[in-house]
Image (tube, rainbow, N blue to C red):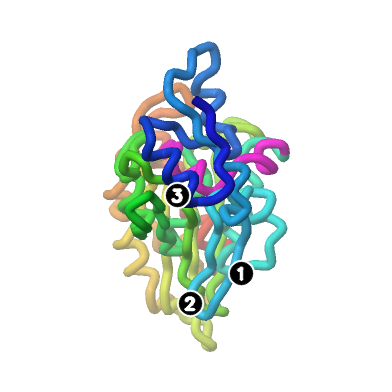
Amino acid sequence: MYARPGTIEEAAEAMAAADALAVCGGTDVFPAHAGKPLTRPLVDLSGIGGLRGISTDDRCIRFGAATTWTDIIRADLPPAFDGLKAAAREVGSIQIQNRGSIAGNLCNASPAADGVPPLLTLDAAVELASVSGRRVLPLSTFITGYRRTALRPGEIVSAVVAPKPSARARSAFVKLGARRYLVISILMAAAVIEKDAAGRVVSAAVAVGAASPVAQRLPELEQDLRGLGPGVKPSSLVAPRHLAPLSPIDDVRAGAAYRLEAALAVIGEALDRAAEG
């Protein structure tokens, strides 16, 4: 079965009809099924106009689920989203950025998904739609493990929502790979730092990807960064003890020990870039 609904409501009905697989850009779904028969019904979400686009109100910035990485790169967003834009430029090739969607990156639930760390530092939440209505989950609880999410049968992601940040907040994203472009991350880090008028850090958010089954925030480091005075580089505070939430593995791209060692440098670079604005 193949369905191409025109509204979110029609999509929810199609998803509820069977054990359907939702697809939009297809940049993760199609490679995963290369050479394999597709046994599940397919619900194509790319025809739903209301799923694509970025909107802002007094409280939040809302990314429709089908919003592409190119849309994000071109959007007029606050400086706190510069890290997300930098991550968007790292998602495959320009062709992939033109097709791949923000929700697809989250639903694929890869530990190396470039979009997850910057969205975690922005305290993003995921809006889910089904025939029963809508619910919202923090991104930190939406991705539950390696290739696993909290999506229930019949649900689709309808939007990704981030609270409107302070005008003083600045962000950065740093990716470590075997080459500069078109590569799966060995490790990546995102950071958001807000300073007061005197240049003192009033809040910080740091997240690391590709070093655990799910990208992780580093709360102890965030706490230690608060109150950091002007003239002190945030990277000088990063220590091995801050990496306790991480659980890297050995794989074809790098060893666990290397990832932990590299994390200190990558996190420090992301923090210094964010602090410099």
Q: In the rendered structure, are the residues bearing label 2 and label 3 in contact, judged by CB atoms less than 8 Å apart?
A: no
Which residue is at 50% across, 20% downward?
Answer: 33
User: Which of 143/114 is in front?
Assistant: 143
Magenta region:
95-111
Specify the quadrant that holds the C terminus: bottom right
Q: State the image coordinates of residue 256 (x, y, percent, origin top left).
A: 36, 32
Name the front one of labels 2 and 1.
2
In this view, 8 is above or below 79? above
Q: Earlier in the sequence, mark 2 or mark 3?
A: 2
Query: Residue 11 colored magenta?
Result: no
Q: Earlier in the sequence, mark 1 or mark 3?
A: 1
Q: State the image coordinates of residue 242 (x, y, percent, origin top left).
A: 32, 55
- According to the image, label 1 marks what residue? 79
In this view, 200 is above or below 174? below
Which residue is at 66% across, 47% downward?
Answer: 89
Would residue 88 be visible to someone looking at this image? yes
